[in-house]
Image: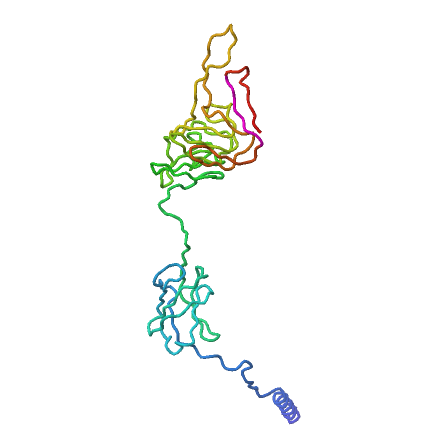
Amino acid sequence: MMITKNRIAVIFSVFSLLLTGCTKEAEVYEEPYGQGKSPLGIKINTTQVPTPASGLPGTNLTISATGLMPYKDQIVFRVNGEQATVTEVTESGITVVVPDYASSGVTSISVGDQVVFGPIFKVNGYLSLDPTFRAINGANNAVMQRYLTDDSKVIFVGAFNNYDNKGLVKPINRIVRTFNDGTYDASLRSGRGANGLLSRIIRIGDRYFVSGYFNGYDQRTENISNITSLFLNGSVDTMGVKTFRRPTQTDTTKYFPKFNGGVAGEITQMHDQGGKILVTGNFFYYVSRQYDKPNSIKRKIQ
């Protein structure tokens, strides 16, 4: 019995030594990066609406904030990263001038290397969308010119064959007239329009002249060489001509485009020069037709 007690005592002593050998005091180290900087105490509600909510460069912008006064001479204010000129700092806010190259984005206040973010400010451009313009889809291809008529309507010419999806009901080929707000004007009598590009339109007297790269307009599918005249309602201007006939034939009157001229190639520019028409483009000679000659002789002038 004594042997057993002695054996237990020895085992307990060894276990105590093992516990003592495994115990080590915890070491406390210093903060490797030093103490963090104390908060600035500047408070800005990032959901507030600035005064004004938007503006052009040069606008005086005011944002509500507290805790600014201790840093009045150290503050750097930015609009989406672009530094602004601070004009006033008060207990309740800050006023700055929106910088020239600012863009819409988050405002911020910096003091040294600490940054406090503010609300979003929208910088307006010098051009902006007109919300009263009612054309939703517009033209489905290039518009080459916008022409303002005397009655404040607008004629567009170009490479399109649809405008605001109205071409699904009535053909709209390279010419369309709208009201000033972009609404489609169905009263233009252009018929099937031009069968090719219209690049320019001018008015001389009581006629429009359209030019570009086409050889047909509405039902006139021949005798047009990239330029023709239109009535003010948009229909092609025609004239009746007694064409050449053999002695055994009776007189026949046919109708042709009244503007008897054109060029062999594309017209890119057209101008009114004192009642005359000046055109430039990718062409080599001028053409006109003599309908009283056999086969309507076409004259070419280089």
Judged from this view, the residue extending furthest toward the front is: 274
Q: How many numbered discs, if any? A: 0
Q: Residue at x 39, y 74 (%)?
A: 42
66 or 247, nearer to the observer = 247
Quadrant where the N terminus is found in the figure: bottom right
Magenta residues, as a range? 284-291
Point out the image quarter for the C terminus: top right
> Residue 119 sits in which quadrant?
bottom left
* Residue 52 percent coordinates (x, y): 34, 61
Quadrant in the rendering for residue 177: top left
* x, y percent for residue 121: 40, 61
Relative to 184, does residue 243 appear above or below in the rendering?
above
Tell me the residue at 38%/47% (across/down). 130
The colour scheme used to paint the residues is rainbow
Depth order, front residue of 34/106: 106
Task: Please name the predominant secondary structure of the magenta segment in the image.
Answer: strand
Give the residue furthest to the top: 248
Drawn side of residue 18 relative to residue 72, left or right: right
> Which of 121 and 153 lies nearest the eye of the viewer?
153
Please indicate whether residue 302 sits to the left or right of residue 157 in the image: right
251 w.r.t. 300: above or below? above
Give the quarter of the image for residue 185: top left
- In the image, is residue 299 part of the stretch drawn in magenta? no
**Residue 181, position in %: x, y?**
36, 41
Residue closest to the eye, 165 or 218: 218
Image coords of residue 152 (percent x, y)? 34, 38
Taking the magenta stretch, the answer to whether it contains residue 288 is: yes
